[in-house]
């Protein structure tokens, strides 16, 4: 669980330290803007941006029942964030599995990617797709509606 929150906490810690140092040397306006940028980075790299994760077994069970894709992701992954942002509100329809919180999900990703934990890995109808185009994922979600 702490591994999931490590990137956002580091962004906040670094932003706070940098802002405190700049506050002594620079004007407060620059310091506030820089600190807010670090807070934004922390938020974007936190699990709060993504839909609630479930474990891999539950995701596969739900996907078999409703035909929706399963998205394997991890916090701090720029490609996962890109997929999440480009999907917009439709992203909540997919089943999301955080591979840092679910060892079984990490094993599924390693099996699909020659032993590497390359994310996002999207499984549609039992076939894995590594770092697919967000438009394609959106189409898959529309088909399962």
Image (cartoon, rainbow, N blue to C red):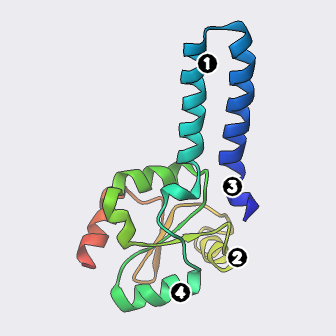
Left or right of residue 45, residue 1 in this image: right
Look at the numbered disc 3 and give the secondary structure of its residue: helix
Q: Which residue lies at the image location 37% right of the left edge and 56% below the top edge? A: 133
Precedes in sequence: disc 1 or disc 3: 3
Task: Tell me whether the residue at label 4 lies in contact with that at label 1, contact meaning CB atoms closer than 8 angstroms.
Answer: no
Q: Nearer the viewer, residue 32 or 80?
A: 32
User: In the drawing, what numbered circle is on residue 103?
Assistant: 2
Compared with residue 92, is residue 17 higher up or lower down, i.e. above or below? above
Report the Cα–Cα distance between label 1 and label 3.
24 Å
Residue count near mark 4 (Cα–Cα under 10 Å), binned few <14, some 14–19, many ≥20: few
Q: Nearer the viewer, mark 4 or mark 1?
A: 1
Precedes in sequence: disc 3 or disc 4: 3
Precedes in sequence: disc 4 or disc 1: 1
> Residue 10 in the image: x percent, y percent?
72, 42
Would you name the residue on which mark 1 appears?
Answer: 31
Q: Which residue lies at the image location 73% right of the left edge and 37% below the top edge? A: 13
Left or right of residue 99, residue 138 in this image: left
User: In the drawing, what numbered circle is on residue 58?
Assistant: 4
| Rendering quarter of residue 125 | bottom left
Would you name the residue on which mark 3 appears?
Answer: 5
């Amino acid at each position: 669980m702490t591994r999931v929150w490590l990137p956002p906490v580091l962004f906040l810690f670094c932003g706070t330290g940098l802002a405190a140092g700049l506050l002594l040397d620079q004007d407060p306006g620059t310091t506030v803007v820089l600190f807010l940028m670090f807070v934004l980075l922390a938020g974007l790299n936190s699990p709060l941006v993504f839909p609630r994760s479930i474990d891999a077994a539950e995701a596969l069970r739900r996907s078999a029942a409703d035909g929706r894709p399963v998205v394997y992701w991890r916090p701090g992954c720029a490609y996962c964030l890109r997929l999440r942002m480009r999907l917009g509100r439709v992203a909540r329809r997919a089943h999301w599995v955080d591979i840092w919180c679910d060892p079984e999900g990490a094993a599924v990703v390693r099996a699909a990617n020659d032993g590497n934990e390359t994310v996002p890995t999207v499984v549609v109808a039992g076939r894995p797709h590594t770092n697919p185009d967000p438009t394609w994922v959106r189409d898959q979600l529309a088909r399962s509606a």
